[in-house]
Amino acid sequence: MPLGQEPPQLLKSLMFYQGRKFSYEVSRFKLPNKSIGDYECIRHPGGSMAVPVTADGQFVLVRQYRFAMQGRLLEFPAGTVEKGETPLETIQREIQEETGYKANTWKTLGNFPNAPGYSDEIIYAYLATDLEKLPEALALDEDEDIEVIHMSADELEKAILTGTPIDAKSIAAFYMAKAYL
C-alpha cells in the first residue's frame, strides 16, 4: 500500500475533559511513515444551523457575545444537537428560541466539518423559509445575549467582504443558500 493510504494506528487515547457541550482528548498515533505523535481533539455531538429568510428576502441573523472571541459576532441561528434530537429538530427549536421565528419550509443545504484540524464537529445547514413571527418573547438560554438582526443579501455580502466579525459557518451557509434564492 502506498505511503499515506494506510490509516494511522491508534496507540492510546486519554480523555482530559468532559463538559456539557464537548470533550477534549489527546490520542497518540503511529503514522504510516512510522513516526509517532500526539494529537488533540475536541469531540462534539454536532451542530445544526439555519439560514432564515423572510418573505421580503431579509436574512435573519443574531449578533451575540462569544466568550472565546471576547466580542460580538454576527451569525445565523445555530445550536448543539442534543441527545435524542435530529439535526433538523435541533434547529427547529433553536430558530424559535434565538430569533422568535418559526419556519414552515425547510430545505437541507448539506453538512460540513466545522474545524477539522482539531474537532470532529459536523455542522448541518438548512434553509428556513415561510417564516412566521411568534407572539411570545425569545426563550434564550441563561448564558445567551442575543440581538436579532435583519439584512438583505447585498448588506450581508458587504458585511462579509468588509471584515465584519461573522462566524465561518454562517459565511459558508450563506453562499450555500444563495443557490436556492
Image (spheres, rainbow, N blue to C red):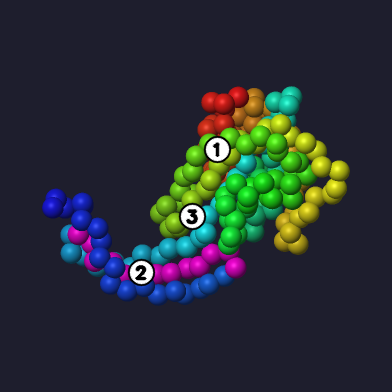
| Residue 155 rendering spot, x and y as whole percentages | 67, 28
Mark 3 to mark 2 CA distance (whole Å): 17 Å
Mark 2 to mark 1 CA distance (whole Å): 34 Å
Q: Earlier in the sequence, mark 3 or mark 1?
A: 1
Q: Earlier in the sequence, mark 3 or mark 2?
A: 2
**Residue 37 visible in the displayed image:** yes
Q: Amino acid at mark 3?
A: Glu
As helix, strand or loop, the secondary structure at mark 3 comes to loop
Residue picked out by circle 1: 108
Magenta-drawn stretch contains 69: no
**Residue 68 visible in the displayed image:** no
Residue picked out by circle 3: 121
Please tell me whether mark 3 or mark 2 is closer to you in this view.
3
- Give residue 27's mark: 2
Stretch in magenta: 20-32
Q: Amino acid at mark 1?
A: Thr
| Residue 108 rendering spot, x and y as whole percentages | 55, 38
In this picture, residue 46 sits left or right of residue 138: left
